[in-house]
Amino acid sequence: MNKDELRRIGLEVLRPSDDGDIVRWLEANVSSIPDSPMPGPFRSDRTPWIAEALRIAADPEVRMLTIQASIQSGKSLFARLYLCWMIANKPGPTMLLQATDPEARDFSIRSLRPLFNCCEPVARRLKPEDSDRSTTIDFDRMTLYCRGAWNEANLQRLSLRTVIGDEAWLYPRGHIGEASARVTAFGWMGKRIFMSQGGTAGDEWTQIHESTDMREWHFSCPKCGALQPWEWAQVRLPESAKETGTWDLLAVAAGTTYECRSCLERLPDNNATRLEANAKGAFVATKPASAAGYVGLHWNALACMSWGELGVLMLKAAEAVDLYADEEGRRLFKQKRLALPWSEEGGAIVNLEEAGPYQAGDDWPHEARITPKGEIVGREGAPEGSIRFRTVGIDVQRGSFWIAVRGWAKTGHSRLLHYGKAETWEQLDDLVKRFEVNRGLVAVDSGDQSDTVYREAGAKRGWKCTKGSGQLDFTVRDRNGTSKRFYSDKQKVHVPGYAQRAELIVFSALAAKDILNGLRLKKLHTYPADAPAEYPEQLNAEVRVIKNGRPIWQLRAGKRDNHALDCEVMAMLIALRWGLVGREASELGDLPSEK
């Protein structure tokens, strides 16, 4: 060893680790990404969600990081870039997992090593004896093991500071936990990073991701600046693409837009729009984590892929279900493009616009009336004493209420007239009076604070008390004796101190939500363009899944509030009991949907 070599080694030992920004370091040191469709050095402005993910991963307070993201949106690139920074600045024994040993070997040779060679600080640390065909890569002060998660022997014996797992949804159950245990010896310095597309509801990967704070990538609307998540519900397929009754896929590809849920601007489908929208983006936590330092990140293909192209993929998947009952396309779309866990859910995956082309205060000439004889008629020619066919659903919370007011046409079409929050029973009185709703058409949830609801809603005001049930049907009395329905006969509830008894209707929560879902799919059940932002968010908060062989509606991952859905179920229940929903169109037969 000569003097110059000894000096170089000494300087390398004394060189401080990089404590600056990981993204700036990568932009300065990664000269090229060999397999990238965009030539040149790493640039964070192309994929700002990866830049933010890298900064989060580099935070020493983050002990567990999960990334659930769409395919071809940067998950694997994130892992390779993070390894470059770590090898040069925070070296320590590390294992990178792919699903199988052959996949790990291929990833090591074709993806990892070429990038390492394009990062001079990393290439300089490769030991001379390292073999470029080996899946164990030896660096100065660090060994990187590339292994397959299916081989349980790979998850034993090693003591590691960092474990990085790719496509974790494919691992055998328990192997994520086995891999995580390898960092125990390093205590607070141990870090676990797992990445995947969407898995299957209830699997180990999904449970681990849901134990984090589940941060969602939000973009900033180029028009109004509102920060919001990329959501499939905001994709607008062009109505003109289905004028002949079948979808014109070329028109879908060319005419699909994305609607800002704040200002309702229709964003054009091009890369410039997505770049501008993502430039001021950020990850926003959707729930508390189960432990300190547990961070989860999610982004989907809407952030980086043509919405029209995604619309075509979705329609083809829906067509396969309709024609052949083949769910594979839907599963792939949900897991790989939306990066969500797959479950056997009901309904369609087509998200057409439900917000009608009207404002909340607009006059609606088709709104029905109830005559003094209990007949449902149109507005024109309604006899004196008729009342508007408007129903109210009220979701009772601790110290507040959510209320939905809905108007109905004879055909079963309906419009949301008001949705909002009230603080007192007296405020509810004012809203019911303001919208001229008959007390017999008001339904209030009594599942919580039952005694209070029976007293205030039932005995004092004559409103209907309701309660959702897991029971599928009820035996009811009718003109033919008895029959089965999804809601019970009215039950009288005695309230101490009141002569008037409260009326309680118990209903099947599953059946009611299924019926409401059907009305929405048929475009009979709409809401105004100026509905509050929380309304569609809460209305779409649940998804239909199969659990233990039975269908149920449950909250989607990351959602907590479903008040609008509960309110609408109760408002619909009243219309159903009147026999309105499901009637065939008469003079309104020319109104097939709210267009």
Image (cartoon, rainbow, N blue to C red):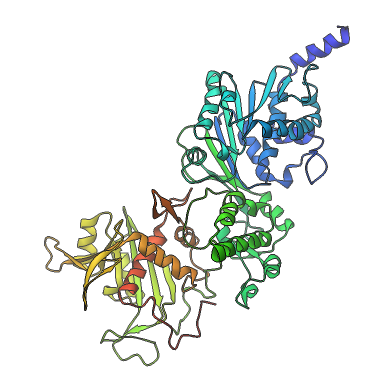
Residue displayed at 36% across by 60% down: 510
In the figure, 410 relative to 555: above or below?
below
Q: Identify the residue at the far front of this view.
A: 324
Residue displayed at 48% across by 48% down: 557
Instruction: Report the number of numbered marks.
Output: 0
Quadrant containing the N terminus in the rendered view: top right
Quadrant containing the C terminus in the rendered view: bottom right
- Between 473 and 44, the residue placed more toward the observer is 473
User: Residue 298: horizontal and vertical position, in percent?
Assistant: 58, 45
User: Residue 574: horizontal and vertical position, in percent?
Assistant: 32, 71
Residue displayed at 51% across by 74% down: 359
Tell me where residue 482 sits by quadrant.
bottom left
User: Residue 549: horizontal and vertical position, in percent?
Assistant: 39, 51
- Between 15 and 137, the residue placed more toward the observer is 137
Q: Is residue 230 visible?
A: no
Q: Is residue 475 visible?
A: yes
- Between 173 and 177, the residue placed more toward the observer is 173
- Between 143 and 575, the residue placed more toward the observer is 143
User: Residue 448: horizontal and vertical position, in percent?
Assistant: 28, 54
